[in-house]
């Protein structure tokens, strides 16, 4: 035990999930289908033909899952709300049973001493809205504001931390530019439009919160520090483009009311000009920023890498996760300091951080050892402690993920969970990483210096 590694007394320790990845029962009790249900049931789009029809069956098992969180000592839980579960058509009609599910979940969390953090949008757009253009329809900012208002009126008396969007970059890059994620489009001209309307929707939700809410609302982005493969002008320019496209495209309009100048270079005539009123809507003051961090990228110029013309260079002798990501804890410290220096002293949360490694299919003797994940967790928690020591106003850490879940188009082939899920029996088995994290929480970080078991 080393008290030098202890975190601030008010620091929140938790874990994170998302609705479509764990809930199952996507159209139960009057819920409307989402774009992910349609995408998952489209042949060839999901690994092994997996879908979220059952997933971790959290919709029926949330009480025991919350009890497990309490057993592991977790103080907070970040979950997402399925828009179509509470508003089946995306607008208008409310589904009381769907809304009641989230009320019961929040009440259960609070009864177990766990603080809820609710995300309004984690990629599962109602199919009914996609049929009306989805994120390409400018009206979606108002639809999202109305949906947000419903949740604020219903849950803000119990939920004190709200996230508007989760990783808008992934929504547009995977869903509208490269077609790897729902809704599966591949269109250079659509991606900037979807990105812009996502940010307008964020602004609309923040405005709604200022009218109705009493606590805190923020935005969640994924940041991947971009390092240059060489000091050639071509590689330096490629790295700047990659950074603008992934890291600054969403934060600069939210904080500065403008897009990075590199966006025009990346998209050419597909990059629109937007009215100032849009930026006035997007640039709403937020109470915190959520950071999802997994890896870095070392970039080189690549004419074939559409449209950014930058591609990653695999690093020799690095530990690589099952998703092909380099384990690079220093990047988390660097990113936290970059956010502080570029965007100011806003409170920050690590809203996702985790790793997919091979796990044995079943626990042996009641124990499931995942040493690479334990090491990943330890090194990244040390990294955020280093950032706090350098003045970063970090308020909490949410490990990704509580449960092995549906990893989007990878299906169930990639396991990120602290808790193993047997997909046939739904048996939950905490891995060694879960027990390690429980000891970190119990000591408020004081065990971080010791070698991970």
Image (cartoon, rainbow, N blue to C red):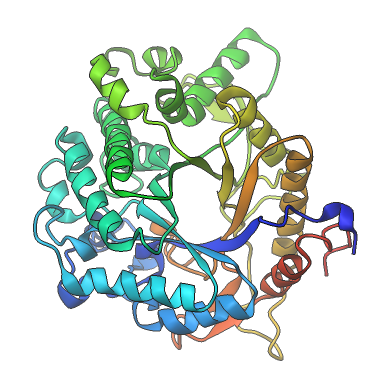
Residue drawn at point x = 9 percent, y = 55 percent = 92
Residue 298, image x, y percentages:
64, 30
Instruction: Residue lying at the far bottom in this picture: please name it.
Output: 365
Which residue is pictured at 21% across the width and 76% down the height?
28
- In this orientation, which residue lies closer to the viewer: 134 or 105? 105
Q: Nearer the viewer, residue 231 or 429?
A: 429
- Relative to 443, 220 lies left or right: left
Residue drawn 57% across and 47% down? Answer: 349
Work out whether 57 lies above or below 41: below
Q: Is residue 361 left or right of residue 319?
A: left
Depth check: give the residue in front, 195 or 337.
337
Q: Is residue 208 above or below residue 113?
A: above
Q: Can see residue 226? A: no
In the image: residue 148, left or right of residue 233 = left
Q: In which quarter of the image is residue 321?
A: bottom right
Query: What is the residue that sits farthest to the top in this orientation?
Result: 233
């Amino acid at each position: 035990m080393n008290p030098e590694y202890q975190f601030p007394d008010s620091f929140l320790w938790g874990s994170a999930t998302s609705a479509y990845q764990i809930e199952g029962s996507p159209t139960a009790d009057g819920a409307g289908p989402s774009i992910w249900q349609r995408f998952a049931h489209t042949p060839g789009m999901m690994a092994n033909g997996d879908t979220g029809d059952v997933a971790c069956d959290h919709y029926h098992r949330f009480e025991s899952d919350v009890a497990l969180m309490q057993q592991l000592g977790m103080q907070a839980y970040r979950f997402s709300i399925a828009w179509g579960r509470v508003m089946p058509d995306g607008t208008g009609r409310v589904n009381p049973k769907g809304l009641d599910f989230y009320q019961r979940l929040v009440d259960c969390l609070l009864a177990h001493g766990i603080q809820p953090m609710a995300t309004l949008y984690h990629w599962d757009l109602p199919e009914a809205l996609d049929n009306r253009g989805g994120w390409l329809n400018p009206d979606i900012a108002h639809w999202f504001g109305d949906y947000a208002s419903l949740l604020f009126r219903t849950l803000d008396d119990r939920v004190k931390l709200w996230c508007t969007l989760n990783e808008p970059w992934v929504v547009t890059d995977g869903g509208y530019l490269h077609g790897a994620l729902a809704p599966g489009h591949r269109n250079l001209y659509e991606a900037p439009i979807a990105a812009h309307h996502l940010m307008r929707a964020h602004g609309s939700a923040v405005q709604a919160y200022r009218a109705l809410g009493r606590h805190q609302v923020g935005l969640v982005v994924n940041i991947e520090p971009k390092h240059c493969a060489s000091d050639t002008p071509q590689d330096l320019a490629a790295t700047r483009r990659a950074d603008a496209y992934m890291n600054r495209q969403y934060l600069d309009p939210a904080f500065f009311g403008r897009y990075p100048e590199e966006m025009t270079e990346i998209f050419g005539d597909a990059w629109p000009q937007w009215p100032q009123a849009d930026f006035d809507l997007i640039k709403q003051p937020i109470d915190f920023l959520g950071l999802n961090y997994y890896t870095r990228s070392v970039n080189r110029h690549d004419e074939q890498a559409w449209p950014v013309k930058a591609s990653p260079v695999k690093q020799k002798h690095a530990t690589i996760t099952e998703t092909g990501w380099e384990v690079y804890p220093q990047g988390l410290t660097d990113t936290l300091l970059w956010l502080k220096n570029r965007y100011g002293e806003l409170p920050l949360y690590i809203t996702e951080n985790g790793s997919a490694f091979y796990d044995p299919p079943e626990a042996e003797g009641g124990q499931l050892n995942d040493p690479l994940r334990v090491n990943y967790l330890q090194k990244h928690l040390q990294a955020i402690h280093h950032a706090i020591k350098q003045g970063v106003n970090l308020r909490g850490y949410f490990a990704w993920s509580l449960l092995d879940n549906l990893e989007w188009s990878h299906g169930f082939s990639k396991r990120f969970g602290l808790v193993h899920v047997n997909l046939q029996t739904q048996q939950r088995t905490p891995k060694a990483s879960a027990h390690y994290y429980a000891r970190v929480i119990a000591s408020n970080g004081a065990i971080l210096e010791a070698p991970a078991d």
